[in-house]
Amino acid sequence: MIPKTLEWLGGKLRIVDQRALPDKLVFWDCESCSEAAEAIRTLAVRGAPAIGIAAAYGVLLGAKRDRGAVKDAIAELASTRPTAVNLFWALERMRETAERFADLPDRDFIAALEREARTIHEEDVRNNRKIGEFGQSFLPERGAVITHCNAGAMATGGHGTALGILRSAREHGKEMKVYADETRPLLQGARITAWELAEDGFDVTLICDSMAGALMRDRAINAVIVGADRIAANGDTANKIGTYSLAVLAAHHHVPFYAAAPYSTIDPKTPSGADIPIEERDPDEIRELPAGRRAPQNISVWNPAFDVTPAWLITGIVTERGIKKAPYNF
Ligand code: MRU
């Protein structure tokens, strides 16, 4: 069973601390705006829609402590992660709500902010279900997909975007095998997607990111489905590093490539992908591997050690007898 990714409980924001997955299920009850900001910054809560929801509750936590500090709370939360536009979208909704109800007494003012944060949360789950319904229609009765990072229940208010499509497909009786990229450097695919799908009884197989090309060539893949952190006005889409490589591979192998995201991820003010701010993180995230188990214990794995690059993709083979070019005549 997948726990609730986020929950407003007893006046606190309860999140699943995703840094501990899949080893342990740890909950973090954030009691202040700064704690919510810390949870977002450290990827305890992650995934564009979940970041937006956590930020909305973060503003509420800030206002509960000091209703005069809403502006500061918004600024603190806005500084956590730059790419997922859902963060700024949710903060703007909370700012507008605070402004609209500024004249209300404390209790009613806080109640209005709580209503807005809950609405943002509930809308996201409803939108994911709609995305799931639309998305499942392009999947066959039986097949296989590749996904990258985690765009599932753990990255959203629930159900998920990319993984929501798979959940909806299953509700329609479809049987989809899922290949999950491990997603270096922080292994959201191995630690979170593989765990989330296995917990929900999906047929999921874990691969290293570098295996996706060989997989597309050697096995029947019906689609690549990923989430998004920000979609520019022209459709350029930012998502977890490695998504672009996967899209190139999909185009090469004539595999349909879909990004699944709610409108809160679309940023009409950003004209193209070149204008999307791309977060750069701590170099140690690459120098070191995350501690603890990096995937669920008994998860199915495809682990070929080598793959074959066809001659037509090779410009030349440099040998001690010179550079050989196709057609080869060794
Ligand atoms: O760094 P993360 O784990 O927050 O990155 C998450 C992703 O790239 C997701 O695919 C994206 O936010 C969509 S979540 C529905």
Image (cartoon, helix red, strand yellow):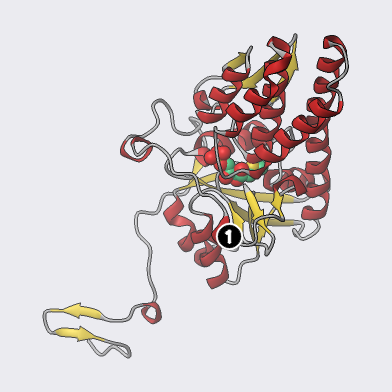
Image quarter where the N terminus lies is top right
Quadrant in the picture for residue 320: bottom left
Q: Is residue 87 visible?
A: yes
Q: Is mark 1 within 8 Å of ligand 1?
A: no
Q: Quadrant of ligand 1?
A: top right
Give x and y (percent) for residue 9.
74, 13
Front residue of 189 and 327: 189
Image quarter where the C terminus lies is bottom left
Residue at the spot 15% in from the left edge and 85% down from the top edge: 322
* Placement of 7 over or under 305, stated as above or below: above
68 sits to left or right of 328: right
Quadrant in the picture for residue 269: bottom right
Taking the view exactly as shown, the residue that stands out farthest to the left is 320
Give x and y (percent) for residue 25.
57, 19
* Amino acid type for the residue under numbered disc 1: Gly
Graded by Cα atoms within 10 Å as few (under 14), some (14 to 19) or many (20 or more), the crowding at tag 1 reads some
* Placement of 269 over or under 186, stated as above or below: below
Residue at the spot 78% in from the left edge and 26% down from the top edge: 117
Q: Is residue 202 visible?
A: no
Report which residue position mark 1 lands on. Answer: 273
- Say how many tags the image has: 1
Quadrant in the picture for residue 86: top right
Residue at the spot 20% in from the left edge and 78% down from the top edge: 318
Give x and y (percent) for residue 166.
72, 47
24 sits to left or right of 133: left
* Placement of 30 over or under 40, stated as above or below: above
Residue at the spot 35% in from the left edge and 59% down from the top edge: 306
Give x and y (percent) for residue 301.
48, 44
Check disc 1 and report its element: helix, strand or loop: helix
